Image (tube, rainbow, N blue to C red):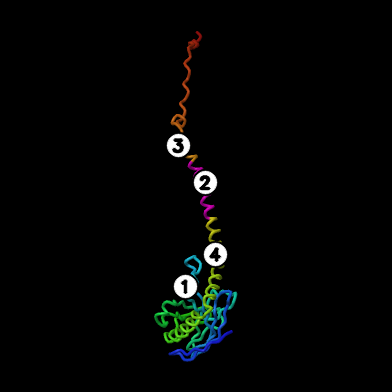
Amino acid sequence: MQRINLDIPGLGRLRAAYTDDWEEGVTTYTVTAPRVTGAFAVALAEEWDTGRPLDPDSPRVRIDYGAHVPGRHYFHGWERPDRPVVNGISLVGAAYVDLDVMRQRRLGWRDVNCRKAIGKWHDTPAPQPTNERTALVVHALVFHWATRPDNLALRLAACRRHAGRLSTNIQRDIKRQEELVAEELARLQRLRESLTAARVLADMPPAQTSPASPSPIPHSTQEAPPCPQPSA
């Protein structure tokens, strides 16, 4: 565990202890600052909608509100331990920031997507002052993370993790598509068989398909026997 102390205009002294998960490329900062306590997990943002491996040079960074636990993948942000409390409000969820934007300006309250936890499974937008204070913290932590000498190693670790999970997803999708293709090929074969049978009937000459004419009744050449005469 390593420690940093930062003096941030508008916030004051920020103290943080941070740990790195080198298997997954995630850094967890446990923060103490005026009206701020709790953990923020920082990592290269995963892009699942592209279906492609991560670019280690991507400027997109994800900040989860709460600590990262190695080997755990949280479907709900409420499950993360040590979620931040800012201005007395317990935060839930995550923010995505762009380093290219940070090079041009400081992050503002609109950039950090703070959600206020209500009970266990519900949340609502946090007040603007809470977003503003959180933005100061997030900007400082992401700047520290991005300028570390070993930042590339963290990025590559995140890419390896993403590639492993992406490979599993792609293999599942390939299997599903192969099953669909097999079903379509079987359907195509049935259609071809039906087409062959239909063409055989359609190509038959009319004489073979018209109803047979009735056989003529043969004409007899013998005289008919005389009708019997009534007796006297």
In this view, the residue farthest toward the front is 149
Amino acid at dot 1 = Ser
- Alpha carbon separation for disc pair 2 and 4: 30 Å
Mark 1, residue position:
58
Q: Which mark is residue 202?
A: 3
Q: Nearer the viewer, residue 26 or 34?
A: 26
Asked whether the residues under the numbered discs 2 and 3 touch, taking CB atoms below 8 Å apart as contact, a structural biologist would say: no
- The residue shown at (49%, 40%) is 196
For the residues labelled 3 and 4, the Cα–Cα distance comes to 49 Å
The nearer-to-camera label among 2 and 3 is 2
Q: CA distance from mark 4 to mark 1?
A: 22 Å
What secondary structure is marked by label 3?
A: helix
The reply to whether callout 3 and callout 4 are in contact (CB within 8 Å) is: no
Chain part drawn in magenta: 180-195
Q: Earlier in the sequence, mark 4 or mark 1?
A: 1
Q: Which residue is mark 2?
A: 189
Using the image as rendered, state which of residue 29 and residue 78 is in the foreground.
29
Mark nearest the camera among 2 and 1 is: 1
Q: Nearer the viewer, mark 4 or mark 1?
A: 1
The residue lying furthest to the left in this view is 104
Q: What secondary structure is found at the residue carrying circle 1? A: loop
Amino acid carrying label 2: it is Gln
Disc number for residue 169: 4
Q: Earlier in the sequence, mark 3 or mark 4?
A: 4
Quarter of the image for residue 3 reads: bottom right
What is the spatial separation of the Cα atoms under label 3 and label 1, in whole angstroms? 63 Å
Q: Is residue 112 above or below residue 202?
A: below
Q: Depth-wise, is mark 3 or mark 1 nearer the camera? A: 1
Q: Which amino acid, mark 3?
A: Ala
Structural distance between the alpha carbons of marks 2 and 1: 47 Å
